[in-house]
Amino acid sequence: MSHKKVAILISGGGSNMVTLVDSMTGDHPARPCLVLSNRTDAGGLKKAAERGIATAVVDHRPFGKDREAFETELVKPILETGADIVCLAGFMRVLTVGFVSQFEGRMLNIHPSLLPKYKGLHTHARALEAGDTRHGCTVHEVTPLLDDGPVLGQAEVPVLAGDTPELLAARVLEQEHRLYPAVLQRFAAGDRTPIHMS
């Protein structure tokens, strides 16, 4: 059986990356081929290296506002590994149409809200401000529109009395660690039926 190759893009500690990598064993249809970051100090790089996965860094800072030039470099290690699927896991740079279109239909992202609610940042604070009783996370295919694209899975958590954005974020993160590996396993096997967890 030839496994699908997965490149994972991170900007920080890489907790979602770790759960994805650790899930890709046994009869899983995919294997990690690369962990790529835009930050040299991303904690996830060390965790990936400890797991024997190739890592690469393309620092966005020297490129200033030139996103295309940054992405021209960013795409190189992905293409070199021959990745079949690209997973964004806390990658904090907005990607242009030019980059996204190269991986259309095979690029996933996890977002900490129940999309289409709360695209962008500060999702937990916004859910609390809105008085929501349910919050959660979404895995979706990446399209050129930010936090858009077909939903492949959602996991819900209750919003509790006394919640702060930090408490809510921690509860959502636990669900992210369940949802993302489950969606990736199905997606790599060619199944795009959305999953719902609560």
Image (tube, grey):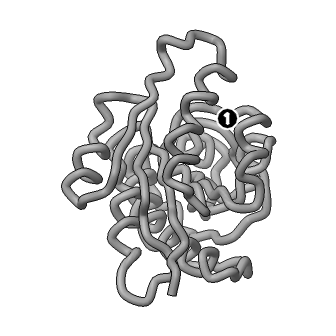
Q: Which residue is mark 1?
A: 95
Along the line of sight, the residue nearer the viewer: 195 or 75:
75
Q: Quadrant of residue 74?
A: top right
Residue under the point 67% across and 34% down: 95
For badge 1, the amino acid type reads Leu
Crowd around label 1: few <14 · some 14–19 · many ≥20 (10 Å)? some
Residue 194 located left or right of residue 161: right
Residue under the point 58% across and 74% down: 183
Residue under the point 57% across and 31% down: 93
Along the line of sight, the residue nearer the viewer: 71 or 148:
71
On the image, the x and y values in percent for residue 109 come to 61, 54
Give the structural element (helix, strand or loop) at label 1.
loop
On the image, the x and y values in percent for residue 144 come to 79, 42
Q: Say above or below: 197 vs 18.
A: below
Q: Is residue 41 something one can see in this rendering?
A: yes
Residue 75 located left or right of residue 169: right
Q: Say above or below: 97 vs 148.
A: above
